[in-house]
């Protein structure tokens, strides 16, 4: 099993992304094949991880996929690599609200049997850092905090005081990083600006992170810690092996079983191709040669700066189900890929690019015509906005009789959902776990045939199902219900 380490912190804003991305880039530059991972549903950080490593950035979410799939998905993503770096989410022990440790960084670290490097924002403390680190290291005896990296250290004297305080803590100091403005990434209403929108600047920032980490972190000690992780049992997840055969999609409960099959290696060529397509969560599966002539229906996958949120496993599952997945950019492409039989539009920031998306009238008409033909269309969050009649007053595709606008309120959190309408993705009664993350409002919030019934934080119906269209704010991870991809591709063939 690949050497592995989890990068965690006491709280958000401590510098996990800085350290994790810097470690990935530094080890990659040193010649190691590094597999990047992110705990939780985040789409943006994996884009920076992909730039650092040249490999797909992959998510490990024990809520969306269930705990049993975390290790198999990890094995799939890290197969053939020398080292895996897993960036945590929020504070080390922060998980799904009201559900204990579920989906926390600590939970994933235990599922992976991986040591933890704790990143501490030391900017406003000296001796107290020892009490903080001791508390996190001793809170759960099953979580092994193997070292600490001190971030935002003010001076050499400050670093000396911090190291002296930690001498008796039993947790070694693996490095200390000064404040560095050149490695900061700009933010907006949903977090960091995605890589797809600032590729040149992001490459420079990642290079600066690598330099900073090389200068302040003991890389040999981190690698030794990662190599101390014990082996993991069980097979890796496989897109082809994920499909039950010949049975159709099953209804999933709250804890899906592990995917079958052997680890599948996704090489650098596939990652670089996806990066060129400007996908935030780069790493689309390499598609098989095909198209209409070979019986493999073309599934168009929206990408580019406006639609940069997608899990790598979705394209892999579509390919394994028999589709040829072709990425296109709604900001620039005036036509759908030739032979398109189905359309997948994931998340992103269409609200930022509403004028440009609206100006691309030929593509808007092509999308409307495809949806009008009854072809399957899967739209999540940003895709929902794009299919609406208008977004912030700008004409969109007009597939849905709804309007979308920016809002002051952030909607964020995990959701329990059940399908209330039969669609190209799921049958009525299919249970899924999903995630909402947006600062927009669609009116009405649901069509005559809603997509989902949600149970928390309040009971409501949400989304739209009409003909082949399934449009919703809910982000789901198809590895938890691979029958979605098979059902979608079968509808494309029909």
Image (spheres, rainbow, N blue to C red):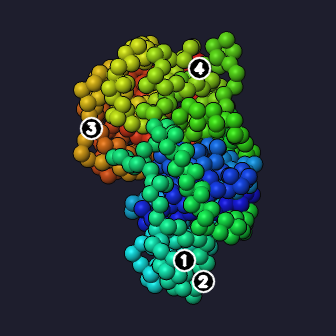
Image: 52 above or below 404: below
Q: Secondary structure at mark 3?
A: strand
- The residue at 61%/78% (across/down) is 172
Q: Residues within 10 Å of mark 4 (few under 14, many from 20)?
A: many
Q: Is residue 119 visible?
A: no
Q: Residues within 10 Å of mark 3 (few under 14, many from 20)?
A: some
Observer-side mark, 1 or 2, equals: 2
Per the model, the C-alpha gap separating discs 3 and 1 is 42 Å
Q: Which numbered circle lies on residue 406?
A: 3
Front one among 223 and 292: 223
Contact between labelled residues 2 and 1, with CB atoms less than 8 Å apart: yes
Per the model, the C-alpha gap separating discs 4 and 3 is 33 Å
Q: Quadrant of the N terminus?
A: bottom right
Q: Secondary structure at mark 1?
A: helix
Front one among 192 and 42: 192
From the image, tell me which residue sits under label 2.
170
Per the model, the C-alpha gap separating discs 4 and 2 is 56 Å
Q: Is residue 206 left or right of residue 319?
A: left
Q: Which numbered circle lies on residue 137?
A: 1
Q: Which numbered circle lies on residue 298?
A: 4
Q: Earlier in the sequence, mark 3 or mark 2?
A: 2
Residue 60, x across and y down, in percent: 56, 52
Observer-side mark, 4 or 3, equals: 3
């Amino acid at each position: 099993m690949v050497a592995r380490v989890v990068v965690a912190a006491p709280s958000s804003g401590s510098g996990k992304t800085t350290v994790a991305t810097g470690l990935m880039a530094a080890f990659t530059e040193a010649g190691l094949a590094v597999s990047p991972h992110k705990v939780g549903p985040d789409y943006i950080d994996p884009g920076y991880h992909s730039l650092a490593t040249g490999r797909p950035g992959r998510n490990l979410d024990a809520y969306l996929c269930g705990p049993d799939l975390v290790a198999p998905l990890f094995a799939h993503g890290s197969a053939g690599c020398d080292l895996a770096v897993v960036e945590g989410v929020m504070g080390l022990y922060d998980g799904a609200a009201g559900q204990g440790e579920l989906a926390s960084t600590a939970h994933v670290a235990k599922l992976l049997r991986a040591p933890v490097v704790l990143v501490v924002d030391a900017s406003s403390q000296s001796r107290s850092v020892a009490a903080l680190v001791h508390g996190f290291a001793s809170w759960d005896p099953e979580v092994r905090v193997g070292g600490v990296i001190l971030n935002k250290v003010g001076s050499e004297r400050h670093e000396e005081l911090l190291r002296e305080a930690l001498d008796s803590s039993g947790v070694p100091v693996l490095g200390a990083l000064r404040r560095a403005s050149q490695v900061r990434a700009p933010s907006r209403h949903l977090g960091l600006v995605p890589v797809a929108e600032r590729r040149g600047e992001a490459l420079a920032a990642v290079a600066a992170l690598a330099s900073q980490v090389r200068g302040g972190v003991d890389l040999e000690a981190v690698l030794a810690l990662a190599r101390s992780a014990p082996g993991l049992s069980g097979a890796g997840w496989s897109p082809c092996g994920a499909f039950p055969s010949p049975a159709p999609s099953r209804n999933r409960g709250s804890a899906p079983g592990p995917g079958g099959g052997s680890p599948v290696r996704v090489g650098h060529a596939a990652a670089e191709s996806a990066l060129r397509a400007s996908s935030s969560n780069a790493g689309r599966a390499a598609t098989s040669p095909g198209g209409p002539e070979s019986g493999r229906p073309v599934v168009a996958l929206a990408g580019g700066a406006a639609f940069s949120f997608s899990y790598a496993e979705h394209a892999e599952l579509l390919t394994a189900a028999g589709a040829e997945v072709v990425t296109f950019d709604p900001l620039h492409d005036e036509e759908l890929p030739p032979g398109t039989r189905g359309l997948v539009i994931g998340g992103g920031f269409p609200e930022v690019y509403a004028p440009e998306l609206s100006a691309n009238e030929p593509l808007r008409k092509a999308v409307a015509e495809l949806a009008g033909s009854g072809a399957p269309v899967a739209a999540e969050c940003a895709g929902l906005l794009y299919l609406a009649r208008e977004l912030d007053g700008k004409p969109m595709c007009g597939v849905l009789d709804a309007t979308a606008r920016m809002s002051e309120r952030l909607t964020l959190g995990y959701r329990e959902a059940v399908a209330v309408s039969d669609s190209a993705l799921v049958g009525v009664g299919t249970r899924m776990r999903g995630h909402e993350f947006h600062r927009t409002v669609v009116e009405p919030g649901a069509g005559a045939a809603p997509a989902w019934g949600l149970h928390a934080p309040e009971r409501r119906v949400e989304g739209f199902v009409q003909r082949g269209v399934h449009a919703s704010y809910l982000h789901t991870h198809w590895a938890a219900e691979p029958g979605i991809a098979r059902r979608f591709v079968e509808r494309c063939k029909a």
